Amino acid sequence: MERDEALYHRVLSGDRQALADLVERYYAPLLAFLTRLTGQPQIAEDLVQESFIRMLKYHGSAPLSFRPWAYRIAHNLARDHFRSSKVRREIASDLDEALEDDPVGETQDAERIAIQADNRAQVAALLQRLPAHQREVLVLRFYHDLPLEEIAEITGAPLGTVKSRLFHGLLRARQVLELDEVKQNERK
Amino acid sequence: MNESDRRLTEGLDEAQHQELGNLRKLAQFLDSDVLPDPDAQQRARLLAALTPYLPGATATRPPGLKNWLRLARSQLVLFEKSFWLAGIFVLLLGLVIVSLDGRELLPLAFVLFSPLLATAGVAYAFRPETRTLGELERLTATGPLELFYTRLALVLGFNLLVALGLLGLIWLEGPQVALWRLALTWLGPLLTLTGLALYATIRWGALVGLLLPFGLWGSLVMLGVREALLHTAEGVTLSTWLLSGIDSSTPVLIGSMLASILGLGLLFLSGRTRTGAMRSWS
Amino acid sequence: MELKIQGVTKYYGTRAALQNVTLGLMPGIIAVMGPNGSGKTTLLRCLASLVQPERGQLWFDGLDYRRNATSLRSRIGYLPQELDMPSHLTPRQLLAYLATLKNTPMDHAVYPLLDALGLETIADIPFSRLSGGQIRLVGIAQAFLGQPDLLLLDELTRGLDVEERARVFALVRKPAPGRLLLYSTHHPADAEQAADGVIILRQGRVLFSGEVAKLYQQAQTIGSSLVTPIQENNPRSKRISQENDASGSMEARLIYPSVSDSPDSTIGLTIEEAYLRLLQKPDNEAGNRVRCKLASR
């Protein structure tokens, strides 16, 4: 199979088939990444499109390794989107900041997890309970099976920090899940 | 360690592994979230949205005839109907002259008035009437020089078409003068006056761009007429004298060729002046 | 895609339109405000690369304006303050023409913009027969053509009616990740409509730059306001900012010069009041050398 770097090079030469192939390879994974990162499928679609547009409009030297570069573009766009204070006002509760001081299980969201029937919604809710920097590392590691070195490149954080974020993210996710089970059992 | 556990913890230290303990339930829980892949319709929609940004296909078109024609076609809207009607009017005028007494009068009218049509066209096309549009044109992927010469080519090209029409009429009438000499004699003033009109319009506005070449040409014509009138005393008609000069005089031909070179120089200078003014930063 | 403005100074004759302006802006929406002659238009024209400052430097997305103006221009969308369009052209013709120059296809770019701004009904009417507000909408539409990375909209809402303003702000607020949009306005309320951050200029200098919330905070430290029945003669007040008819009685909104002067029952400032208070700050308090990353953490 043609390497991503060579494929991208053909895309930059105006090869429409190469663009179709690139979309085939990266649309699904980038969409999944952004959906899990943002928790909002519609926003994720917009961000995916914008990510591809950025790749096409890119003016600098070609990336040595395409995959982390592509994920980095998507990651940065999601970050910029959430940095907009307008977006922050529109989000019902700013989970990331609330969670800095909020011990696991003390807010209404833990209850929300317990009553949601849909698996996907439950997982999405759990992921949204994590701070953004932990969430993105966990998603990239678990769902995209990327090595921590590549995740460090994507998020722009040192490897040690990525490890720490993964560790604390897993810890928190496990705690949320256990608490959810306890609440479900109590209801029964 | 099973696959799901590996995907969760690969890369972490042993101590961190131990502290996290058994993550099987978490892994299973996370695994239950299976996002559907985009369907064919979604992929087609994304591809359609991305195609305009494909390098080479749209954003950066390679120079070439196809691109130039596309650019030229897009600029046609900038010319009002009156511009095209003026050219057609001149052609019709030529027809009228032919019907009256074309043999001598038409070549004369062609040399004297056709350059003025091109001059007026250039002053119109490059008038700084709408500064806004000029600024908006700068903020595009199309280079200012490319735009400038395309517009100039449109104006000159249209005038060339009109001129060819008139030359055709002259030829049909049975010319009094060699057509190639007539064409060359016409080209010199055309290029010089057009170049002067363009340069003056860019530097000082459309009014100066019109008055300067018109004034210069008018003065030259008056000098020529005065000279001709001296000879008409010998019984030669004005038009015959002028046409014989075009047909047989080498200085007239050389002068016209030099005027063509001067005109091309002025057009080139206009391009540099225009794009230099547009290039604030580089 | 960061926009960096470093020490930019621009003169028109002997008058400094911009004086040593330094800013760092991240993607988002920024409202640029200030009195007439404060340098808003000059700043936007510098950023559009249409005028060159005498001193200072500009970078967008890491590219220096001095060396890369030609390539940067294709990534900029600009709405000029004055819109002088060829009278015989129609909006559709103008947009089609500019779309061609920008290498953007009509159906992909132009029609959605006509739709979003409610221009379909006037798309084929010559500019000579359109109102100022309608022409402005077309100007806004062409700025958005080709999804530019840097959008500069001068006097965004000039001449627009209520419905037109609503459409414009809906378009401005539409998510566009990675894009930086700056719009200048004379109406502080416009800043609340869409802006993540605000820049206030005065006499060519940056008086304030930051998020809208920070604008309120800073202005609150300067003064407060009180709604009081107008019959009361309150000599301590400095300014009446608005008068409202409320339940049959006239009320005055009074701005106190300092928090300590104001009576107990005070309410927060409106954005207009905050803006006006900041404009009254003495010159030596003006934050000229402000390095502020707006719309970022």
Image: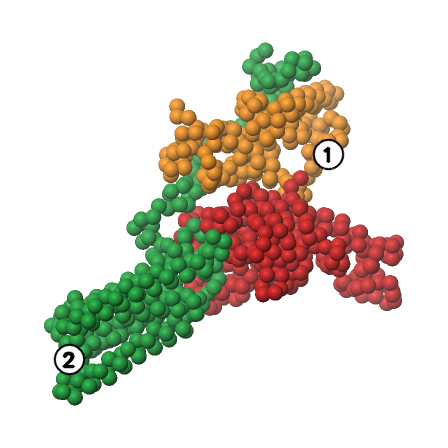
Closer to the camera, A44 or B227?
A: B227
Nearer the observer: mark 2 or 1; the answer is 2
Residue B88: percent from the left, percent from the top? 27, 70
| Quarter containing the C terminus of chain C | top right
Chain with red colouring: C
C259 w.r.t. A81: above or below = below
Element type at mark 2: helix
Q: Residue at x 37, y 61 (%)?
A: B269
Residue at x 66% of width, y 23% of height: A164
Q: Nearer the viewer, residue C205 or C119?
A: C205
Q: Where on the picture, by quarter, is residue A94? A: top right
- Of all chains, the one bearing label 2 is B
Q: Quarter of the image containing the N terminus of chain C? A: top right
Residue at which label 2 appears: B240
Q: Which residue is mark 1?
A: A98
Dot 1 falls on which chain?
A: A
Q: Amino acid at mark 1?
A: Ala
Chain ID for green: B
Q: Colour of chain A?
A: orange
C273 vs A115: above or below: below
**Which x, y percent locates residue A10?**
38, 34
Q: Residue at 39% x, 55% y: name it.
A: B145
